[in-house]
Image (tube, helix red, strand yellow):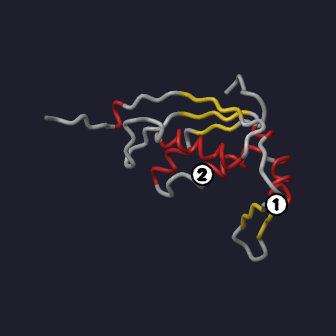
Amino acid sequence: MSTNKLSAKNIQRQKHIVDASGKILGRLATEVAKILMGKNKPQYVPYLDIGDYVMVTNAAKIKVSGKKETQKVYIRHSGYPGGLKTETFDKLLIRKPEYIIEHAVKGMLPHNKLGRQMIKKLKVYAGEEQNGR
């Protein structure tokens, strides 16, 4: 009796379009992360990237619960002394709404080479789907 081994050659990928308007950030991010990892497929294995492509539209219309809109802070550092930059959720939503969803999904993927490969299959748009891309 032989088993059917899954290899990178015979992976079938699909495209999923997810509308973010009115959805809660964390719940949307978990749904997208599962699709990117391939956990929604019966042939899922943790050592292969068998996930599908995901396109998220209307990122500017994402919601968070409670007081997170004014209290959630995104932090980055330039590497220089005094180079700490902080920005709240509501200000970042105006300036760069795509980053919010990318950041949330990236944190839910594996933190290794496989995770870096998975995040490349994610496209996020602030408004409706772009025809030129």
Q: Residue furthest front?
A: 66
Which amino acid, by three-letter code, is at mark 1? Answer: Glu
Residue at 39% from the left image edge and 48% from the top image edge: 46
Alpha-carbon distance for marks 1 and 2? 19 Å
Task: Check if mark 1's residue and mark 2's residue have beta carbons within 8 Å.
Answer: no
Q: Position of residue 19 (x, y in %)?
A: 70, 32
Using the image, determine if residue 68 lies above or below residue 40: below
> Residue 129 falls in which quadrant of the image?
top right
Left or right of residue 85, residue 132 in this image: left
Helix or strand or loop: what does disc 2 sit on? helix
Using the image, determine if residue 13 lies above or below residue 97: above
Residue at 59% from the left image edge and 41% from the top image edge: 32
Residue at 50% from the left image edge and 34% from the top image edge: 52
Mark 1: few/some/many CA within 10 Å (<14, 14-19, 20+): some
Q: Residue furthest top?
A: 131
Q: Residue furthest bottom?
A: 81
Mark 2: few/some/many CA within 10 Å (<14, 14-19, 20+): some
Left or right of residue 97, residue 91 in this image: right
Q: Which residue is mark 2?
A: 106
Q: Position of residue 35 (x, y in %)?
A: 53, 38
Q: Earlier in the sequence, mark 1 or mark 2?
A: 1
Left or right of residue 81, residue 43 in this image: left
Q: Which mark is residue 87?
A: 1
Which amino acid, by three-letter code, is at mark 2? Answer: Lys
Quadrant location of the C terminus?
A: top right
Using the image, determine if residue 110 lies above or below residue 118: below
> Residue 119 falls in which quadrant of the image?
top right
Residue at 83% from the left image edge and 58% from the top image edge: 67
Q: Position of residue 16 (x, y in %)?
A: 58, 29
Quadrant location of the N terminus?
A: top left
